[in-house]
Image: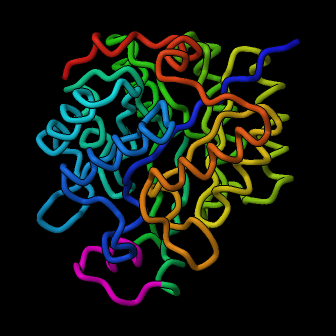
Amino acid sequence: MAKPRKVIITSAVTGAIHTPSMSPHLPVTAEEIAEAAIGAAEAGASIVHMHARDPKDGSPSQDPKHFEPILEKIKANTDAVINITTGGSPHMSVEERMRPVIEFQPELASLNMGSMNFGLYPMLDRFQEFEHEWERAGLENSRDLVFKNTFADIQRILEIGNANNTRFEFECYDISHLNNLAHFHGRGLAHGPLFIQSVFGLLGGIGAHPEDLMHMRRTAERLFGDAYQWSILGAGRNQMPLATIGAAMGSHIRVGLEDSLWIGPGQLAASNAQQVERIRTILEALNFEVATPDETREILQLKGRNNVNF
């Protein structure tokens, strides 16, 4: 009898897309972010994906001093894989976005695989009251925003990660991003097993219809064969439906308040842990097993929690 498939759950704890005024449950301070990550790990997430915020106003920050207390507390209280962003915010320079990965040399880091329009301004139709002016301005300015990830940017990030044996969560928002990844894989700069995070439902990237998911899957299969591990990220209300479809097709899963504030129609998620618990229930009902942190390290061939700089 075949063993149940192991599914990796990533929890994206907090990010640059949503702002503190959008949900009282979005973690902002270092203490809140660390506690949210630990709760997600206890619920079954074997990877926690990390952004940091300036505690003064909750704005996205890539200052290593804002990451350090978060990383230290998570590592002291869980053996989950810590995945540090190189995306930061679309409003940041690549040099600014890379600071925490250069400083802390994590097991895993995110890497956006192409430049794209990054439209967050439709959220202004849902949210009108903001505590900080940067929140409204950030959404409004996304009408005329290109999230810059050129071939030179990607190569530089890969070279830094490869030098420290940091592997990547390759965030692919469209089909062209898969082809970009194939280019770097063919050049020997992106190493397998490639951990491909297919992102659906953000304005400027691929849509969130099941046919879009199928198209991403077919393209990845053609380009990478058995050289990759596939994961699904559905933005907003698409989070749970696309995660379920993806899991049934063989994917891993990413959930979290970075990607969606919701747990059901009109119902804000109370925590990252609540979203992890929901998708874990679905996975176990489908007779899959949730991968442990050590199993995740083996699947993705990570360097181990003792080989980081924090």
Residue at 32% across, 77% down: 21
Q: Quadrant of residue 68?
A: top left
In the image, is residue 96 above or below residue 83?
Answer: below
Task: For the N terminus, give its image quadrant.
Answer: top right
Residue 69 left/right relative to 110? left
Membership of 128 in magenta stretch: yes
Residue at 28% across, 29% down: 101
Please, which colouring scheme is shown? rainbow
Residue 76 left/right relative to 155? left
Number of marks present in the image shown = 0
Q: Quadrant of residue 177?
A: top right
Residue 23 left/right relative to 293? left
Q: Where are the magenta residues, as a range?
A: 127-140
In the image, is residue 242 above or below residue 8?
Answer: below
Q: Quadrant of residue 163?
A: top left
Residue 3 in the image: state x and y as whole percent.
Answer: 78, 15
| Front in this rendered view, residue 60 or 272 | 272
- Whether residue 177 is visible, yes or no, is no
Residue 121 in the image: state x and y as whole percent.
Answer: 49, 76
| Front in this rendered view, residue 113 or 273 | 273
Residue at 47% across, 22% down: 293
Residue at 66% across, 46% down: 281
Task: For the C terminus, give its image quadrant.
Answer: top left
- Whether residue 304 is visible, yes or no, is yes
Membership of 197 in magenta stretch: no
In the image, is residue 214 above or below residue 264?
Answer: above
Residue 176 in the image: state x and y as whole percent.
Answer: 68, 41
Residue 164 in the image: state x and y as whole percent.
Answer: 32, 12
